[in-house]
Amino acid sequence: MIGNMTDEPKYAVEATQTSLAILEALVDSNDPVGVTALADIVGVSKSVAHNHLSTLRAAGYAVKRSDRYEASLRPLALGERTRDGFGFYQAAKQQLDNLAAATGETATLFVLEERGGVPVSISEPEGGWSAPFHAGERLPLHVNAPGKAILASLASDRVDRILDETDLVAPTSATIVDPAELTDELRQIRDDGVAFCRGEQYEGIIGVAAPLPQINGSRTAALGVCGPVNRLNGRYLREDITGQVLSTTKSIQVDLTAN
Amino acid sequence: MIGNMTDEPKYAVEATQTSLAILEALVDSNDPVGVTALADIVGVSKSVAHNHLSTLRAAGYAVKRSDRYEASLRPLALGERTRDGFGFYQAAKQQLDNLAAATGETATLFVLEERGGVPVSISEPEGGWSAPFHAGERLPLHVNAPGKAILASLASDRVDRILDETDLVAPTSATIVDPAELTDELRQIRDDGVAFCRGEQYEGIIGVAAPLPQINGSRTAALGVCGPVNRLNGRYLREDITGQVLSTTKSIQVDLTAN
DNA sequence: ATATTTGTTCTGTTCTGATGAACAGCCTTT
DNA sequence: AAAGGCTGTTCATCAGAACAGAACAAATAT
């Protein structure tokens, strides 16, 4: 980790930064917030908070209800539209639901975004276990199975650059923080075609993932299953689940080349 | 429609407006866009577009891939988090899925946002019909069943103010544009407890909706079913579907008062 | 090899966005 | 009833940030 991983823009627009900070503060606090409270949270004066809030409101990103502001659902619409823009989403979503239904486990689809992995879709089986992360939330690549699968499907120089620019944080004691050790595991993953995660992101959460074949040379993606270790283990994990994950990636590939 | 419906903020932050315009331009164009193209679309100089793009990128809202920019999935995460903040979402989502599965039709949950109705959740049955709108997208209240159900559950002075401040656009020839006529229908809806939409938003799309009982006096919401007129009509619509919509609202109320 | 077009940097100028105080409205408290 | 402390909003002032435009380098096209 030598590189410049904090790419601060040379000529950043400060007003935008505070506006986004206010928007995120609104999202963070579930309950409606007043102008004064918001100003304190973000660290700006009351009138500044008011100006930004009214512009956010006029743009449809914030909602005012009797002197209190809250985040609107407009970001949800933006997110769904960008997601629908992914060529493979419709097909993958369908297969992901099938996978979740067939295994009774939580199935996820990840894409590479800058230097992180982002869950695009999370399929939870009927009344099943709930994943501790949201769709659209950027996660480190080295701590989960889909992330490692994505890394394994990249050219080695890109992997080196990503690892160099990334602070290999260790959420649990099982996390791999040594780049050399990680590179070794990536080679293993490339050979097997499957990546595993054993409580490296969240204690007691296990994952399996396989890279999604690059469709028309565009987005790097991976697909996997994750769940608590008391259910995902032994042969069930290594053969049953792993097999279904692999066959699902093949089904998606078929669906995409067919159209 | 006399009132001031274009509430332009008195002291708007222009930099924020251009940043958001750029973000939305990114979302609109599915494909990666260059700086120059974006500058042309938004109507700013090249350097300005560059500055805003790099701040959006640093904040995680835009992604750069080899000299081209695209929207990130971060808005999706924000949207899902605000949605999860709605107290009734978890329970309603469950019942909505049940409703969609039981009827084989598309079920939706709407909330009131400013002067519009926003779909919070859209449950489509297995391989079913796809609704022509996205979750999080703000729609006029007077052109769809959930919107009318929401209006009907508001105090009459609020309804008057909303109708006064809203331009009653007419997407189809069936749309009601006369405030008096609309007020009459709202009274009817209050009596029946159900609202109907007959191709007033999209040609050939029918909807039924019922207001969701106000939980702890917070958000105004409604729940409904919609689909093509060739399937949703006659007794099936008026009795079968309508009955299931009404019983679903009751189930949600039970779920919420239980906890 | 030349000519365009790209993204990025940079500097000066302008106008905007931050400041901090003052305003009016709404509670609660006295 | 009246006073005090809250709130969100407005306003005039001025430092400074955001903009336009030119100049740069690198990649692509001719």
Image (spheres, coloured by chain):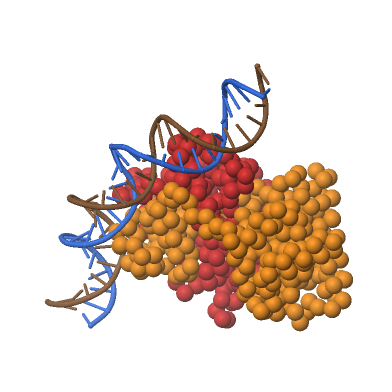
Chain colours: A red, B orange, C brown, D blue
Taking depth in this image into account, of A244 and B166 the one nearest to the observer is B166
Q: Is residue A134 above or below residue A77?
A: above
In the displayed structure, would residue C2 be above or below residue B90?
below
Q: Measured along the vertical axis of the image, is residue A29 above or below residue B114? A: above
Residue placed at 86% from the left, 71% from the top?
B240
Between A88 and A253, the residue placed more toward the observer is: A88
Q: Can I make out residue B172 in this image?
A: yes
Q: Is residue B122 visible?
A: no
Count of numbered circles in the view? 0
On the picture, is A18 further left or further right than B245?
A: left
**Which quadrant would residue B258 be assigned to in this image?**
top right
Measuring from the top left, give residue B103's x and y in whole percent: 81, 70
Where does the image place residue A92, in percent across and percent down from the top left?
60, 68
Tell me the quadrant of the picture where the C terminus of chain B can be found.
Answer: top right
The residue at the point 65 percent across, 61 percent down is B163
Image point 72% across, 66% down: which residue?
B180
Q: Quadrant of the N terminus of chain B?
A: bottom right
Q: Residue at x 40, y 53 (%)?
A: B14
Measuring from the top left, give residue B88's x and y in whole percent. 73, 50
Coordinates of residue A39 in the picture (x, y in percent): 49, 37
- Left or right: where does residue A97 sit relative to residue D6? right
